[in-house]
Image (cartoon, rainbow, N blue to C red):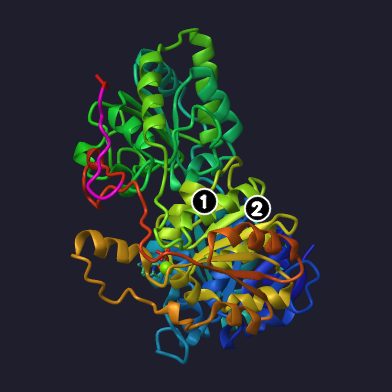
Amino acid sequence: MTERMTGAQALVRALEHVGVDTVFGIPGGAILPAYDPLYDSTKVRHVLVRHEQGAGHAAEGYAQATGRVGVCMATSGPGATNLVTPIADAFMDSVPIVAITGQVASSMIGTDAFQESDISGITMPITKHNFLVTDADDIPRTIMEAFHIASTGRPGPVLVDISKDALQAQTEFRWPPTMQLPGYRPVTRPHSKQIREAAKLIAEAKRPVLYVGGGVHKARASTELLELAELADIPVVTTLMARGTFPDGHPQHLGMPGMHGSVSAVGALQKSDLIIGLGVRFDDRVTGDLSTFAPRAKIVHADIDPAEISKNRHADVPIVGDCREVITDLIAAIRASGQKGDYSDWWKLLNGLKETYPLGYDTAEDGSLAPQYVMERLSAIVGPDAYYVSGVGQHQMWAAQFIEYEKPGTFINSGGLGTMGFAVPAAMGAKMGCPDATVWAIDGDGCFQMTNQELATCAIEGVPIKIAVINNGNLGMVRQWQTLFYDERYSNTDLQTTRRIPDFVKLAEAYGCVGLRCERPEDVDAVIEKAMEINDVPVVIDFVVHQDAMVWPMIAGGASNDTIQIAVDMAPKWENEE
Ligand SMILES: Cc1ncc(C[n+]2csc(CCOP(=O)(O)OP(=O)(O)O)c2C)c(N)n1
Ligand SMILES: [Mg+2]
């Protein structure tokens, strides 16, 4: 059965058929034909955002919280280019989103027409795939393919750019269309020989570590991970993208590795003789100087994307496959072999590191608020069922370090691209995807000023997120580098937010939200509790914190992980290790 309709109607109908319930976007000339039938859709809710960047991050937050494809929409030219940052962000963090943009009429493409930009060309290197559609007949199939590509294999962003004449033309709508993706077949089943090889190395190892990344949660494999870790008694480190994938409170968890990782997690990788990397990409923020990273470790590297394997570090046992299948097979192989490694000396060393070098922080002598304390109290009061969505900077690292994540996917942040402005719109998207969940954005005073206009969207659309602005008056993370590496020459990092420009409480109120302020440690619990009681409108808390608080431990950019410091000029002692 076919039905005659416009390309725009076919677009909306296709979105309904692939199960889209929420689209974040802003209309404009080229995409206008699509907004007309969208107005009538009872299945697809369109959320009018205030900036297209917000639409893209909201789609990402929605996708991360629900595990489904997030959708954003924009017009041609500036609407589309405003989506470039979130598309790049989704690409770096493997977030499944579909971005739909209007394009000028096909006869005008290439003429520098009004609001023409070659968005498929611009986003070619930052999309998993992209399409330029100029024929209405192609719209349903393209939408189906876009959602399939975004959500299968290694997830990622897909752009569908549709010319205005294709949206306006008549077409015969038929569903389901036949996908034409002959070259696209992600391998999900790992090779059994590689699995046996990995199990053998695990049994032979003396110092194994499970290095767990974002791919494990994306494969929905945290239950299997727990089983594997406990069965084999192997320590676990969780990257920034994997916080919560393995419970923080579990005795086998050593913390986050990398530039601001715990001494136990960094030390475990450095001293390891076998790293089992699962859904990770040996990112430079984890490895530091590659040539000195984990020098004695053999590497088992499992990832769904073959391009990741041996990209940065040679894999002795490469495994291409879906992490859930890989872990399930590893469990079976370890059980079948009946062999078990003896890691008691290893555990002694690691537990020693964990005990000697727990995460900690100094409180300021003047009694001002420590940002880390805010995180600890948020964690204690709000608990592990909430989603925590952070911006980028010091507050992001404190949120990664001092909030205890017990559940997979509960920490949502911009890892690969490090996009300031991610938190508010991503929190909005997460809350719209999971309306019953409590969603906290943890934002910096700098980041917040990049995308806080989405507070208007939240207030109007009834999305009661909570935002903790960690207001240190500065572009704090950059200031920290200036303190450490530029002789305390604070070039252009003072935001002067201490002068209350802007006043975040008034700003919140101007946007129809509740604004609260907290400046003293003794008031932290009460203000968080108050925010937790408000569930009808968004709440912004301006936490005015000490400007000199620093993120520790730290490994300087590009330096060896062996040079990790726990405070200025303080290195851990790697005693009794060999
Ligand atoms: C869009 C963008 N511009 C610049 C940067 C570089 N940068 C990284 S962290 C940071 C400071 C963030 O300041 P704030 O939001 O106040 O967070 P804080 O570090 O103070 O917690 C900057 C400027 C970035 N990551 N993203
Ligand atoms: Mg700041």
- The residue depicted at 44 percent of the width and 75 percent of the height is 119
537, above or below 511, in the image: above
- The residue depicted at 37 percent of the width and 25 percent of the height is 352
* Amino acid type shown at disc 1: Pro
Mark 2, secondary structure of its residue: helix
Q: Which residue is mark 1?
A: 155
- For residue 220, the mark is none
Q: Identify which residue, 344 or 417, lies in the foreground.
A: 344
Q: Identify which residue, 451 or 194, lies in the foreground.
A: 451
* Ligand 1 within 8 Å of the CB at mark 2: no
The total number of labels drawn is 2
- What segment carries the magenta color? 567-575
Q: Name the spot of residue 211 as percent of width and height, x first.
A: 41, 34
407, above or below 51, in the image: above
Q: Quadrant of residue 58?
A: bottom right
Q: Which residue is mark 2?
A: 66
**Quadrant in which the N terminus is drawn:** bottom right
Residue at the bottom extreme of this rendering: 114
Relative to 205, 412 lies left or right? right
Q: Name the spot of residue 235 as percent of width and height, x first.
A: 44, 26
Q: Identify which residue, 31 or 539, lies in the foreground.
A: 539
Measure the C-alpha gap from mark 2 to mark 1: 14 Å
112 is within the stretch colored magenta: no
Mark 1, secondary structure of its residue: loop
What secondary structure characterizes most of the magenta part? loop
384, above or below 8, in the image: above
Relative to 223, 400 lies left or right? left
* Amino acid type shown at disc 2: Thr
Q: Name the spot of residue 249 as percent of width and height, x first.
A: 56, 34
